[in-house]
Image (spheres, rainbow, N blue to C red):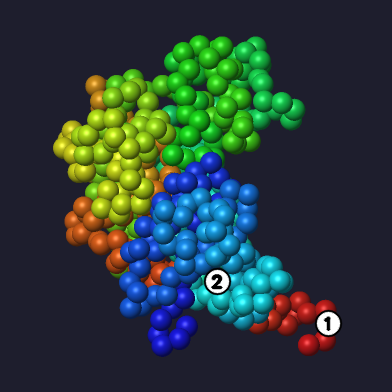
Amino acid sequence: MSNGIKKVGVFFGGRSPEHDISVVTGLQVTAALDPSLFETIPVYISTNGRWYTGDALLDRNNYLPKGSTLEKLTHVTLGLGTGGQATLLPVDPKNKKAKPIPLDFAIPAFHGVQGEDGCIQGAFEMAGLPYSGMRVLAAAAFMDKLTTKELLRDEGIPLLPTININRPERGLLVLPEELQKLLGDIVFPCILKPRHLGSSIGVAKCDNMQELADSLPEVFRFDKAAIVEPFVPNLVEYNVSVARIGGETRTSAIERPKHSSELLDFKAKYLSSGGGVKGGTKQLGRPSEGMLSLTRDINPELPGGMSENIRTWARKTFDHLGASGAPRIDFLSNSKTGEVWLNEVNPLPGSFAYFLWEAAAPSVAFTDLLEHFIKEGEDLHRRSRLPDDPTPTNARLFQR
């Protein structure tokens, strides 16, 4: 850190089916950070797992980097165990101009596996690099839909019954007769989901056993496990973000995504036109539109007590694992019966769900939300630090 300006690495991309969504979120974060307080260092992880940094990564027109754009970037890795300030280290020894880049803080903007699930958080811990968002345990637990429900089962939060199906040791096919043994009380129609992915990737409604068997291989291409849940008729989805701000667990505005199909799938979320324009295409990275301009109702009128129930269950979920950052917690509802169930927790939601905080009472601007993340991450890092030699005196076997 020089002249009081902190070097903040914004990490995005990654080896995840949600790679492209992560790029959009990462660019929104780099654009929203206050340049008078922070020097932004973009760190892009490509689809094949290579790490790059360079100013060309700040322009969304350069994605996915290739050709002359790629030549302008520096291939780097995160220095682990340096014992000092965390550093991005150049990888190519032939690039004599590339110098190590010190980092004061990291903002992971990943979605999905190897980024949202505790993996990159563990690397930051090993590097001694303060970072935003959930710690390793909470990130890993909440990214796993089945584990989330197991942890919340006794907390008085309504949950749908869930059946786990592991990917076969060989191949991707599970025969219908084998599925019948696993399904238990689940009846058709049902919903099939990847156990560890977000953004509705791989989600399918299955009306019979054969459809379920036919849909599983697509899930197993991206995830090692799938879950099956009852189909909720008259489906309405409600989402709310949670953060601990000023010592208080606060909730954002509630959103109700709009969709005409029975199931809010990936294309409905990220490829449909915003603003009521039919047949249009999204313009990536427009901060004022949220994550790819998803059409939504903000703070809709809800039946008596539903809003407070959703907020109470969201706060309880957040506090149960001592979460941090601002996860988005999603609920499903049967609009005719009024029943509501917690669906899943997104440790790092698209666009960090900043549009929900801007619509909250009181409102929190995106720039201020990011500054909160940085202050919170620094505090958590400070409280978790160990002494240079953490071995207690009575446990030392070798001379110091």
| Residue 73 shows in this picture | yes
| Residue 140 shows in this picture | no
Q: Is residue 113 left or right of residue 342?
A: right
Residue 320, image x, y percentages: 44, 52
Residue 72, quarter of picture? bottom right
Q: Looking at the rendering, in which quadrant would you find the C terminus? A: bottom right
User: What residue is at 47 percent from the left and 83 percent from the top?
Assistant: 1
Residue bearing mark 1: 398
Residue 316, image x, y percentages: 37, 49
Give the Cα separation between the discs numbered 1 and 2: 29 Å
Q: Amino acid at mark 2?
A: Leu
Residue 233, image x, y percentages: 33, 20
Above-or-below relation of 4 to 142:
below
Q: Secondary structure at mark 1?
A: loop
Q: Is residue 78 left or right of residue 133?
A: right
Q: Which is nearer the eye, 35 or 163?
A: 35
Q: Is residue 305 left or right of residue 96?
A: left
Residue bearing mark 2: 129
Say whether disc 1 or disc 2 marks the residue closer to the N-terminus. Answer: 2
Q: Secondary structure at mark 2?
A: loop
Residue 256, image x, y percentages: 26, 37
User: What residue is at 36 percent from the left and 57 percent from the top?
Assistant: 28
Residue 245, quarter of picture? bottom left
Q: Which is nearer the eye, 137 or 113?
A: 113
Q: Residues within 10 Å of mark 1 (few under 14, many from 20)?
A: few
Q: Amino acid at mark 1?
A: Phe
Q: Is residue 400 left or right of residue 349?
A: right
